[in-house]
Amino acid sequence: MKLLHVDSSILGTHSVSRQLSAEIVAEWRKSRPDTTVEYLDLALNAPNHFGADAIAVKGIAQPEPTEAQRAENAVSEQLVSQFLAADVIVIGAPFYNFSIPTQLKAWIDRLAQPGRTFKYVETGPVGLATGKTVIVASTRGGAYSTSEGGQATEHQESYLKVVFGFFGVTDVRIVRAEGLAMGAAPKAAALSAARADMEVATV
């Protein structure tokens, strides 16, 4: 079994999402010691934001790609191949400005490749990256899951579920710690709740 461990927090050792994603990987391996782990730190090694050179080779017919287009295509190919080779993907995904970090979005944009992670047929899109498990270490300073207003402004977990579902991943598990910036007691309760989620997510 292959596990891809992805972190995206910009906070380094102060990051709770990094702490939780590492704990998830450790818990997963306890009952599956033969799992091989590959690590990707998007805060240190993020792809360029998706631009014309990145999409040109895949989506636009042209006589000969430029050097810049070849370089961007090589990055996309490396990332999508790494993703497709993994059976399990553990993602540290903090909540930044109502959504995910820009580095994580840049990675997802490179995975969204027609013919690799999805295709269109007469009835609509079909995901091609089936049979995988995605576990998200979701961290938030505030509380968004407990009210209708909070849920309406949350584009982190909801986005990740939609985009990985689009890729064909139906098994998306959330390990959530929210209210981390609301004081010592709420933070402790959030971490306790996340570890309870973790026990279920890593079964």
Image: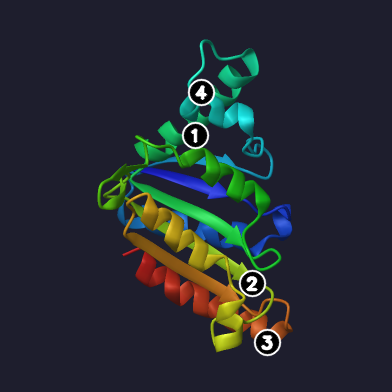
Q: Mark 1 to mark 3: distance in Å?
A: 39 Å
Q: Mark 2 to mark 1: distance in Å?
A: 27 Å
Residue 87 marker: none
Ranked by sequence position, the earlier of labels 4 and 3 is 4
Q: Which residue is drawn at 31% across and 59% down?
A: 170
Which residue does the numbered mark 2 point to in the structure image? 140
Q: Mark 2 to mark 3: distance in Å?
A: 15 Å
Q: Mark 4 to mark 3: distance in Å?
A: 52 Å
Image quadrant occupied by the N terminus? top left
Q: Residue at x 59, y 21 (%)?
A: 69
The quadrant holding residue 184 is bottom right
Q: Do the residues labelled 1 and 4 touch (CB within 8 Å)?
A: no
From this viewpoint, which residue is outermost toward the top?
64
In this view, the mark in front (4 or 2) = 4
The picture places residue 80, in percent across and down from the top left corner, at 44, 35
Q: Which of 133 and 63 is in front in this view?
A: 63
The picture places residue 129, in percent across and down from the top left corner, at 32, 45
Left or right: 196 in relation to 182 = left
Which residue does the numbered mark 4 point to in the structure image? 57
The picture places residue 166, in percent across and down from the top left corner, at 38, 53
Which residue does the numbered mark 1 point to in the structure image? 79
Ranked by sequence position, the earlier of labels 2 and 3 is 2
Q: What residue type is labelled 2?
A: Arg
Q: Mark 4 to mark 2: distance in Å?
A: 37 Å
Left or right: 134 in relation to 20 = left
Q: Is mark 1 on a helix, strand or loop?
A: helix
- Mark 1 burial class by Cα count in 10 Å: few <14, some 14-19, many 20+: some
Ranked by sequence position, the earlier of labels 1 and 4 is 4
